[in-house]
């Protein structure tokens, strides 16, 4: 169970405020997400996000440059293997200095253990499963990843969206990945019971049921050991929603076993 001192009312990716300011935040977040896609490396609340759109934009690496961890391969080059992270603010370094989030830590670990693998971070603050579903086909076509980490769904629950639609979107993303022979790791989230015990339990079960049905990797609760830690308030930013920098190694630790297993599976 999640501790009461942690504000889980807005738990999930792209969560940026209490429910009292939810409507205003959602509008701003949606507009910001659109701007990030268009401008490629727009500096937003969650830090700079590298676009993986096919157009060359301001700040994109030249062909003779080595891009930073989490960026798309330069034109004309193909990594031996690509791990694509499709997520929201929990993966987009919300409130952190650039390069301090778990995805960058993942890139560093893979550089040491699997230098043949590149990490591409296509996470956008405020994104939903619907947004991820619409973005994924182009990303798959451009990057041809061997593994896709899907960290989406928290914002669906925050907005009280129909869980059947959330399930359909996640299922469609899994199928799209399998169509190009990419493995999938689903990163699960939990929401508090004030959304209703039925809604909360059904939401948590979504990830488990889909992982079982499609034999994907599964992280049952992304913030395990953080949101339920005895010192949870110390591990979160002032909004009491987004983890601080010191919590991101634990977030990586929660995801790493599934990533390692799925990269090792022939």
Image: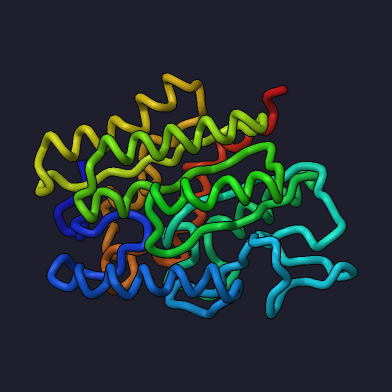
Against 210, is 153 above or below? below
Residue 89 screen position, x and y as percent: 42, 62
Residue 107 screen position, x and y as percent: 67, 54
Is 239 displayed left or right of 71 in the figure? left
Residue at 70% in and 61% down: 54
Number of numbered markers: 0
Against 95, is 221 above or below? above
Is 178 displayed left or right of 110 in the figure? left
Residue at 33% in and 44% down: 189
Q: Nearer the viewer, residue 185 or 111?
A: 185
Q: Can residue 261 be seen in this view?
A: no
Against 22, is 178 above or below? above
Residue at 68% in and 24% down: 265
Q: Is residue 101 visible?
A: yes
Against 144, is 8 above or below? below
Q: Nearer the viewer, residue 57 or 74?
A: 57
Is 253 displayed left or right of 154 in the figure? right
């Amino acid at each position: 169970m999640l501790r009461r001192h942690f504000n889980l009312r807005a738990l999930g990716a792209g969560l940026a405020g209490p429910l009292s300011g939810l409507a205003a935040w959602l509008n701003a977040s949606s507009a910001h997400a659109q701007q990030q896609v268009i401008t490629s490396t727009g500096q937003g609340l969650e830090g700079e996000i590298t676009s993986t759109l096919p157009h060359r934009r301001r700040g994109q690496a030249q062909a003779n440059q080595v891009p930073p961890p989490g960026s798309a391969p330069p034109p004309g080059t193909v990594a031996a293997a690509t791990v694509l992270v499709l997520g929201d603010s929990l993966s987009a370094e919300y409130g952190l200095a650039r390069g301090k989030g778990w995805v960058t830590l993942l890139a560093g670990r893979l550089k040491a253990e699997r230098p043949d693998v590149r990490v591409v971070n296509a996470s956008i603050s405020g994104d939903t499963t619907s947004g991820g579903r619409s973005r994924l086909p182009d990303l798959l076509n451009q990057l041809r990843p061997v593994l896709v980490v899907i960290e989406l769904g928290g914002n669906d629950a925050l907005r009280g969206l129909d869980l059947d639609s959330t399930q359909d979107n996640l299922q469609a993303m899994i199928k799209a990945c399998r169509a190009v022979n990419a493995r999938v790791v689903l990163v699960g989230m939990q929401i508090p019971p004030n959304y209703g015990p039925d809604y909360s339990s059904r939401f948590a079960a979504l990830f488990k049921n889909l992982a079982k049905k499609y034999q994907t990797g599964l992280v049952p609760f992304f913030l395990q050991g953080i949101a339920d830690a005895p010192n949870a308030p110390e591990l979160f930013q002032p909004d009491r929603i987004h983890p601080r920098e010191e919590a991101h190694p634990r977030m990586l630790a929660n995801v790493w076993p599934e990533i390692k297993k799925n990269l090792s599976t022939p």
